[in-house]
Image (tube, helix red, strand yellow):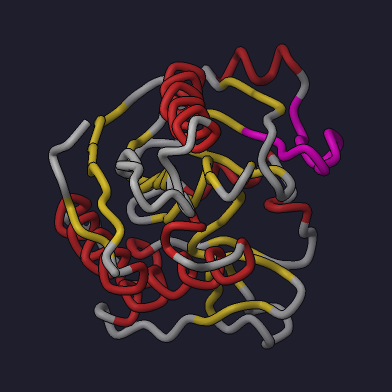
Amino acid sequence: MNYSVVYKDIGLKDYKETWDYQVGIFTELLAAKKSGSGAGDPVGNPPPGTLIFVEHPHVYTLGKSGLENNLLLDNLQLQGKGASFYRIDRGGDITYHGPGQIVGYPIFDLELIGIGLRDYIFKLEEAVIRTVGEFGISSSRLEGGTGVWLEPEVKGRARKICAIGVKASRYITMHGFAFNVNTDLSWFKNINPCGFTDKGVTSLCEELGGIQDINMVKELVKKNLQEVFNLEWTNQL
């Protein structure tokens, strides 16, 4: 069975503004589920999920189990760089969001899709692995860590191209993934990315040696998400 999803590309948007936007949709899905119009209700008409694509101005976010000392800047240095910092309610440690990066926020009901949280993360990774593969780049998972990596088991070569951090309540998800396309990787020098001190980060631009058409990459990610999750796009709100 296909899962109906509204797709929204909201362009370049402030992190906190987008977070609040996510929370609004997330809360509506939770309320619908509690009222009986979610999974398990044969007569209900559950609302569709939402997939948000966005780019953010420079911002560092720290997951609920992350360590603040993985941010290597103080407040004055952050302000001097024109960057923001938020401690948020997703899993994972610290990461960076900025222009040239596709940030995806799927707000899905996993019960309607018929999967658990571990499979959900696996499928997010799979969609990005397929996308990277379309550029002739081999990527995979890192044992003991989330996200999509290049040469994950090669000492001194492991580098992350896509970070993943999610939250779920009653099988409703929010937050998601950050896929480096044309990202300025120098911003990652101000953190221990995802808590790692011995692994690097990369981007499609870095690996392919030139700026990529980010809108084309978005379409590939969207297509691959549709395939791995059996999504059906809808305009229903």
Q: Is residue 111 above or below residue 52?
A: below
Q: Is residue 153 left or right of residue 72?
A: left
Residue toward you, 173 or 175: 173
Residue 130 or residue 169, whichever sits in front:
169
125 is higher (above) or lower (below) than 140: above
Q: Does residue 229 appear left or right of residue 22 in this picture?
A: left
Whether residue 53 is visible, yes or no, is no
Residue 58 position within the rendered picture, expressed as x and y whole percent measured from the top left:
48, 29
Q: Main secondary structure of the magenta part?
A: loop
Rendered location of residue 106, percent (x, y): 41, 47
Answer left or right for 68 relative to 107: right
Residue 119 x, y percent position in the rendering: 56, 71
Residue 65 falls within the magenta-colored stretch: yes
- Residue at x 15%, y 58% (from the top left corner): 216
- The residue under the point 72% across, 80% down is 143
Q: Which residues are magenta?
A: 61-73
Judge by depth and name the residue closer to the eye, 65 or 76.
65
Vertical arrangement, residue 59 with respect to residue 150, above or below = above
Q: Position of residue 179 (x, y in %)?
A: 42, 55
Q: Residue 113, can we see it?
A: yes
Q: Considering the image in quadrants, where does the N terminus appear?
A: bottom left
Residue 50: name its quadrant: top left
User: Does the stretch in magenta take in 171?
Assistant: no
- Residue at the image point whose x is 34% and y is 78% from the top: 130
| Quarter containing the C terminus | top left
How many labels, in total?
0
Residue, x 36% and y 82% (percent of image)?
137
The image quadrant of residue 213 is bottom left
